[in-house]
Amino acid sequence: KNQVEQSPQSLIILEGKNCTLQCNYTVSPFSNLRWYKQDTGRGPVSLTIMTFSENTKSNGRYTATLDADTKQSSLHITASQLSDSASYICVVPGGFGNEKLTFGTGTRLTIIP
Amino acid sequence: DGGITQSPKYLFRKEGQNVTLSCEQNLNHDAMYWYRQDPGQGLRLIYYSQIVNDFQKGDIAEGYSVSREKKESFPLTVTSAQKNPTAFYLCASKREGTGESYGYTFGSGTRLTVV
């Protein structure tokens, strides 16, 4: 069964600090992994897409890493801002023609001033 | 400005009623999806449509129905057969392509509450 597990479930950090969110997946075959940001009461917004050949990709203060061997991804947020408070969801499609998405339950990040 | 519009943002349903959630996109995407989001759970697929006049059941289709008469529109009806409809409903569409151009766009969601 395809699964995506995220940790921690929730995280509270001070504004300006860095943090790292984790995603472990067992989806096979693997083609890509996506990180989404979801503000409360809103739809998810794409942060980055990682293909199996990519190890690191940055989008502003967000840096995603992927280790296809261990089936792990991380999302690192640098110099956090209050607007980073949201849920961060890891999503993995079935791959190679199987587009069914498997969603993680998300990490709820709260930035406090 | 292209995107997906879901309406209404909040919806209240009485027991035994059917309600319809609207999803409209002007992105010219072929594929559209409906997901349900519950606290502490990942999004779950209700229905999806890859082309006009065609749609398939997802993992939790019981108690829901959809139609796809136009490329731009994919309404979801929550019927009285859905025993636990209170949830946040998200509509999405998908762009074909490669790399960053390939991906899913989500609407802002509809929060449905049974009263």
Image (cartoon, rainbow, N blue to C red):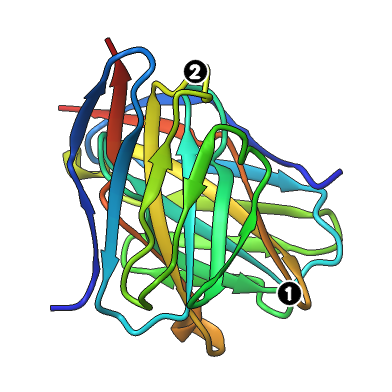
Task: Tell me the chain of label 1.
Answer: A
What residue is shown at x 12% (from left), y 78% (from top)? B1
Total numbered circles: 2
Report the quarter where the C terminus of chain A lies.
top left
Mark 2 to mark 1 CA distance (whole Å): 38 Å
Q: In the figure, is residue A50 to the left or right of A2?
A: left
The crowd level at tag 2 (other Cα within 10 Å; few <14, some 14-19, many 20+) is: few
* Residue at mark 1: A52
Q: In the figure, is residue B39 to the left or right of A15?
A: right
Identify the mark at residue B84; answer none if there is no mark.
2
Q: Amino acid at mark 2?
A: Asn
Q: Nearer the viewer, residue A75 or B43?
A: B43
| Image: A89 above or below B94 | above
Q: In the figure, is residue A17 to the left or right of A2?
A: left
Q: Nearer the viewer, residue B51 or B4?
A: B51
Q: Amino acid at mark 1?
A: Phe
What residue is shown at x 58% (from left), y 47% (from top)? B45
Q: Which label sits in the foreground, 2 or 1?
A: 2
Q: Nearer the viewer, residue B75 or A89?
A: B75
User: Under tag 2, what secondary structure?
Assistant: loop
What residue is shown at x 44% (from left), y 31% (from top)? B79
| Image: B47 above or below A105 | below
